[in-house]
Amino acid sequence: MFRKVLFPTDFSDGAEKAAKRFEKVNEVPVGEVILLHVIDEGTIEDLMNGYSLLYENEELELKDVEEKLREKVMEKLQAKVEDVKRVFKTEKVKPVVRFGVPWEEIVKVAEEEDVSLILLPTHGKLGFSKELLGSTAMRVVKKTFRPVLLLKPKCRCGGEGE
C-alpha cells in the first residue's frame, strides 16, 4: 500500500486520464492523497500586467489577486475530492494550492508531506510537449529522491490503445 501519494493536477483531461490509468493498475488502497495544484508565478505576473492594462485607474494588489486565485483553485480541487477518493481507494484527500515554479513546488510538497510516491501525469494543459516534459516532469524526477510514477494519458497496453 502507498502510504501517501502526491498527485499534482493542472485540471486537464490528461491529468484526469492519468489518474484513471492509475486506478486500473493499482489494486490496493492509498493511505492519503495530496491533491496539488501549482499556480505558476509567471501566470500571475501575466495576469497582473493584463489587468493593469484593462483597469488603469484601479489599484491592484498582488496579494489580492493571489488570494482570489487561491480561493478559485481550492474550489476546483474540492470539487475533485470525491473522484480522487474513488480513484485512489482512500478516504483521506488533502487539497493543496501553491504558488511558484511547478516542478520546484512539486518537489517541496513531496518532501514536506513525506510522500511515498509522486504520481505525475506527463500530458497537461499545455500538452506537456517535450519542452514542458523536460522542464517539469523530468526536473521532478531529477530533483527528488522520492519514487515518481510518470503516467501518460494514452498508451498502447497489451495491444489496446486508450
Image (cartoon, helix red, strand yellow):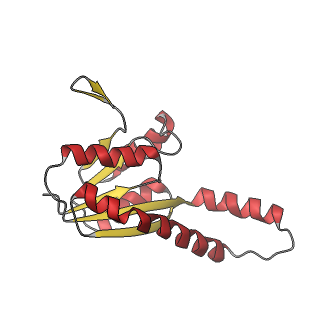
Of all residues, the one furthest to the right in this rendering is 57
Position of residue 155 measured from the top left corner of the image (x, y, whole percent): 32, 30
Q: Is residue 8 above or below residue 70?
A: above
The residue at the point 82 percent across, 63 percent down is 54
Q: Quadrant of residue 93?
A: bottom left
In the figure, 132 relative to 156: above or below? below
The one nearer the camera, 84 or 103, is 84
159 up-or-down from 34: above or below? above
Residue shown at 33% from the left, 64% from the top = 82
The answer to whether residue 139 shows anywhere in this view is no
Counting every numbered tag in the picture gives: 0
Q: From the image, which quarter does the N terminus lie in? A: bottom left
Point 49% across, 41% down: residue: 132
Q: Position of residue 118 (x, y in %)?
A: 29, 54
> Where is the C terminus found, in terms of image quarters?
top left
Residue at the spot 47% in from the left edge and 53% down from the top edge: 10
Q: Is residue 80 visible?
A: yes
- Viewer-side residue, 83 vs 141: 83
Residue 116 image point, x, y percent: 21, 59
| Residue 25 in the image: above or below residue 86 | above
Residue 87 placement, left or right of 36: left
Q: Residue furthest top?
A: 159
Q: Position of residue 16 (x, y in %)?
A: 39, 49
